[in-house]
Amino acid sequence: MKQIASSVHEIKDYTKTQAGNRLLPLTPEAINILNHVKSWNNENKIKSEFIFVNQDGCTFNRQRINTCLYSYCNKVDIIKKSSHKIRRSVISSLLDNIANKKSVQAFAGHEELETTLNSYYKDITDDTELLIGMTACL
């Protein structure tokens, strides 16, 4: 276990389950953002094995990340969502738009499909989409 300068939180060298060890695809835009942040860190002489860190090279805890997210949501005038709610929204959207539930399970890092479906999935389709889908099935 790696200790961070603050005793408030720690970073672990492992995930909760083996399913948590996974590779996630990134869009070209996401890669550009990561490269931009890494360049900014280098220019500002911030040394860390992590990408998103404060000026001292320490990682952000969940509360700090959510505070930043809320601020950005306010700036662009959208509904505020925590990092966990964004995760749930992404998983729900994937399940609504990708036929292969096992792929979504792997993306989410869950050992059991039931976890993905029962704990993370929220039907986000509206009545019109539901009616179109039901009509297509008939």
Image (cartoon, rainbow, N blue to C red):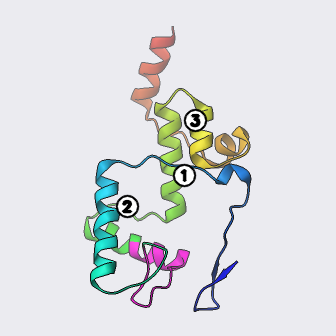
- Residue 114 sits in which quadrant? top right
Q: Which residues are magenta?
A: 52-68
Query: What is the CA distance from the residue labelled 1 to the residue labelled 2?
Result: 15 Å
Q: Would you call the spot at circle 1 few (<14 residues within 10 Å), some (14-19), or many (20 or more)?
A: some
Residue 8 pos. (x, y %): 63, 88
Q: Earlier in the sequence, mark 1 or mark 2?
A: 2
Callout 1–callout 2 Cβ contact below 8 Å: no
**Residue occupied by mark 1:** 88
* Relative depth, front residue between 72 and 29: 29
Q: Report the Cα–Cα distance between label 3 and label 2.
A: 28 Å
Disc nearest the viewer among 1 and 2: 1
Q: Viewer-proximal residue, 41 or 97?
A: 41
Give the vertical position of 21 relative to 38 (above or below). above
Q: Amino acid at mark 1?
A: Arg
Q: Which mark is residue 103?
A: 3
Q: CA distance from mark 1 to mark 3?
A: 15 Å
Q: Amino acid at mark 3?
A: Ser
Q: Circles 1 and 3: CB distance less than 8 Å? A: no
Q: Position of residue 125 (x, y in %)?
A: 46, 35
- Lower sequence index among marks 1 and 3: 1
Residue at the disc numbered 2: 79
Q: For the residue labelled by badge 1, is the local secondary structure a helix, a strand or a loop? A: helix
Quarter of the rendering occupied by the N terminus: bottom right
Q: Amino acid at mark 2?
A: Ile
Local crowd size for mark 2, using a 10 Å CA cut-off: few (<14), some (14–19), many (≥20):
few
Q: Secondary structure at mark 2?
A: loop
Tag 3 and tag 2, C-beta contact below 8 Å: no
* Residue 54 part of the magenta segment: yes
